[in-house]
Image (tube, rainbow, N blue to C red):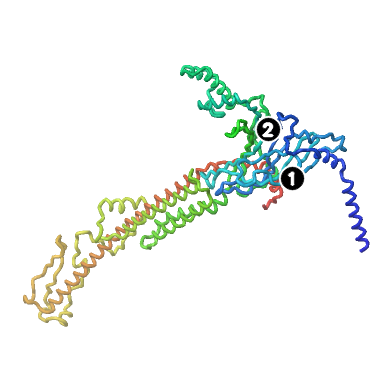
């Protein structure tokens, strides 16, 4: 216990000694630099001097791209460098100290803000320490989470590419210092009366100025008016053309890797520490320095555009949206393979239409409510809904044909030739052949008594048992039928019984007439069923015809709509996989089984 207490006492003593003997040169340097430092004043020796701020971005994470709100959320390091002459020192006077870390709240900071900010914070909120170099160079790399506005182009969603930008610039420091001249301002106002707005391209060019003034002289303008207009045009050239080389910058904003002869940087964002996004591939990150005039001020304001081109990873939407939609669209084709007698054709079409409506509502929840263009998936859903609607109409027509009967419709000759003779062989529809013992009776022809399979004449046993014995042994006068144009015509053999006939003869004739009626009824029923079977066969041919038509339309429409996205044919390797050290480290640590 005593040993532990002594050990703790010694540890505290060593710690206090280290604190007491900390770098005294750095402390003295800090006091000398910041004791009389005013962080509110622009760090230049002369008010006309220019302070150049070099800026860059290091992208750490692409947190989210909210398509509905059109907001891109990024985690970046804002790299800023500038020279502050008041923060320079001689290392030999301070024990060789060449760098010093100071709180950024104690020194002057450029008011660089994100112009296209979509949140409440325009500036950096985490105030990290700045690094001071003995030459006066200040390096400040604070982390920040920005929510910037990004206009979403949904034309090829979900196989889309988006180009988002982040515009950084100084909020208060303008580009050029232009002194105020009252006489020149009056001339400028006079020039405005003739349609020469600030920096407008409508100002006559240098070559056309003489012709313009000559035409104004011909219109009767006085010499003083022409002089004022000439001054206004000259000042308009100054505003609309290249900047005056004698003018000075208050704050010149440049990119860290910008060359003197160009304002464009191919790799404007550092991706070394970028964590690969699971939803987007980073294709390009160029940056460009610009100078822009605003309506409030005469001076230009320099800014830097950081463009981020993103390509969506389509696996998620392919599995969850594209494949189900394609499956449902092809399911609508199978409606024509369902027999009409099932009674579920229209119900299946309506169910498919309702399921597509669910996907449309789901798509509306993902994409922004823009009216500029229709997304690729929306086009496909609209095409599928139109296809299903047409399939419902076609199914109703097929059902109408299927349930036709001789009492309501008569099949025309061309329809019979087209749908019974020609189309079945083309559409591979085979009608089952009738059995050999079934005979088809042609229209307009009647069957004989033998063809109708009427019962044989009564035997002698039947006559002796049931009838008059006087007719036994005689040939019965049975009627027989012959096929004539008017129908059945009964012929009788010469009567072998008295005119009155016997009771047995009368019963036999009634029996024969009943059999003949039954045979005619069966024949009419068969004819009726044959006509119904023809209508059903025509409906089956129509089903097969629509099956082929809608199958081709579905395949062609699916390929024509879904395969028009340019990103499907872009095999460019994403730049984040080439530049990110984190991605390369993950690939190196993956085993062979992974």
Q: Which residue is mark 2?
A: 252
Residue density around tag 1, few if under 14, some if 14–19, many if 20 or more, within 10 Å: some
Q: Position of residue 172 (x, y in %)?
A: 65, 37
Vertical arrangement, residue 141 with respect to residue 507, above or below:
above
Q: Position of residue 478 (x, y in %)?
A: 13, 72
Taking the view exactly as shown, the residue that stands out farthest to the left is 499
Residue 348's place in the image compared with 496, above or below, is above
Q: Position of residue 517 (x, y in %)?
A: 19, 69
Residue 75 falls left or right of residue 364: right
Q: Nearer the viewer, residue 27 or 69?
A: 27
Within-10-Å neighbours for mark 2: few <14, some 14–19, many 20+: many
Relative to the observer, which residue lies in front, 141 or 464?
141
- Could one spot residue 233 in this view of the protein? yes
Q: Quadrant of the N terminus?
A: bottom right
Residue at image x 39%, y 54%? 391
In the shown orientation, is residue 479 left or right of residue 89? left
Q: Which numbered marker is on residue 195?
A: none
Tell me if 124 is positioned left or right of 360 in this view. right
Residue at the spot 10% in from the left edge and 80% down from the top edge: 470
* Image quadrant in which you'd find residue 454: bottom left
Residue nearest the viewer, comparing 214 with 493: 214
Residue 168: name its quadrant: top right
State the SS at label 1. loop
Residue of label 1: 128
Q: Is residue 163 above or below residue 487?
A: above
Residue 267: tell me if it is visible.
no
Q: Is residue 195 above or below residue 108?
A: above
């Amino acid at each position: 216990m005593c040993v532990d207490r002594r050990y703790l006492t010694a540890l505290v003593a060593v710690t206090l000694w280290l604190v007491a003997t900390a770098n005294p040169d750095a402390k003295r340097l800090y006091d000398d630099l910041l004791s009389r430092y005013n962080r509110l004043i622009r760090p230049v020796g002369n008010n006309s001097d220019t302070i150049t701020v070099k800026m860059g971005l290091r992208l750490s994470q692409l947190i989210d791209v909210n398509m509905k709100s059109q907001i891109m959320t990024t985690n970046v390091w804002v790299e800023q460098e500038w020279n502050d002459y008041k923060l320079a020192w001689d290392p030999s006077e301070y024990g060789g100290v060449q760098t010093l870390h100071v709180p950024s709240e104690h020194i002057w900071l450029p008011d660089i803000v994100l112009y296209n900010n979509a949140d409440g914070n325009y500036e950096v909120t985490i105030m990290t320490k700045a690094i001071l170099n003995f030459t006066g160079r200040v390096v400040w790399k604070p982390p920040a989470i920005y929510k910037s506005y990004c206009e979403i182009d949904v034309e090829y969603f979900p196989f889309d590419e988006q180009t988002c930008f982040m515009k950084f610039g100084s909020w208060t420091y303008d580009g050029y210092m232009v002194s105020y001249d009252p006489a020149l301002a009056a001339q400028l106002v006079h020039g405005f009366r003739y349609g020469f707005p600030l920096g407008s391209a409508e100002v006559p060019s240098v070559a056309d100025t003489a012709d313009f003034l000559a035409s104004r002289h011909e219109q009767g303008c006085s010499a003083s008016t022409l002089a004022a207009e000439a001054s206004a045009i000259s000042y308009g050239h100054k505003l609309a053309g290249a900047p005056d080389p004698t003018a000075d910058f208050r704050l010149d904003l440049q990119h860290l890797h910008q060359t003197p002869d160009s304002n464009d940087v191919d790799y404007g964002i550092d991706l070394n520490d970028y964590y690969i996004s699971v939803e987007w591939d980073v294709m390009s990150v160029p940056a460009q320095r610009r100078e822009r005039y605003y309506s409030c001020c005469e001076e230009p304001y320099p800014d830097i555009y950081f463009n981020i081109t993103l390509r969506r990873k389509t696996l998620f939407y392919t599995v969850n949206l594209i494949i189900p939609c394609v499956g449902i669209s092809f399911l609508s084709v199978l409606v024509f393979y369902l027999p009409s007698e099932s009674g579920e054709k229209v119900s299946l079409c309506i169910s498919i239409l309702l399921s597509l409506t669910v996907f449309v509502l789901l798509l509306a929840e993902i994409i922004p409510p823009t009216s500029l263009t229709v997304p690729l998936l929306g086009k496909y859903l609209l095409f599928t809904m139109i296809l299903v609607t047409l399939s419902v109409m076609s199914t109703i027509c097929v059902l109408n044909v299927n349930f036709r009967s001789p009492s309501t419709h008569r099949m025309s000759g061309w329809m019979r030739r087209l749908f019974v003779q020609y189309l079945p062989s083309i559409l591979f529809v085979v009608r089952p052949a009738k059995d050999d013992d079934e005979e088809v009776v042609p229209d307009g022809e009647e069957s004989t008594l033998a063809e109708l399979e009427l019962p044989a004449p009564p035997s002698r046993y039947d006559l002796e048992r049931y009838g008059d014995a006087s007719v036994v042994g005689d040939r019965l006068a049975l009627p027989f039928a012959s096929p004539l144009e008017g129908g059945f015509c009964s012929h009788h053999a010469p009567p072998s019984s008295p005119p009155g006939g016997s009771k047995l003869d009368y019963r036999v004739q009634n029996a024969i007439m009943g059999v003949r009626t039954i045979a005619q009824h069966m024949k009419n029923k068969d004819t009726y069923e044959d006509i119904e079977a023809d209508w059903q066969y025509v409906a089956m041919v129509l089903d097969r015809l629509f099956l082929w038509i809608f199958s081709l339309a579905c395949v062609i429409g699916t390929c024509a709509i879904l395969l028009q996205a340019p990103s499907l044919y872009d095999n460019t390797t994403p730049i984040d996989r080439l530049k990110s050290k984190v991605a390369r480290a993950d690939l190196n640590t993956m085993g062979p089984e992974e």
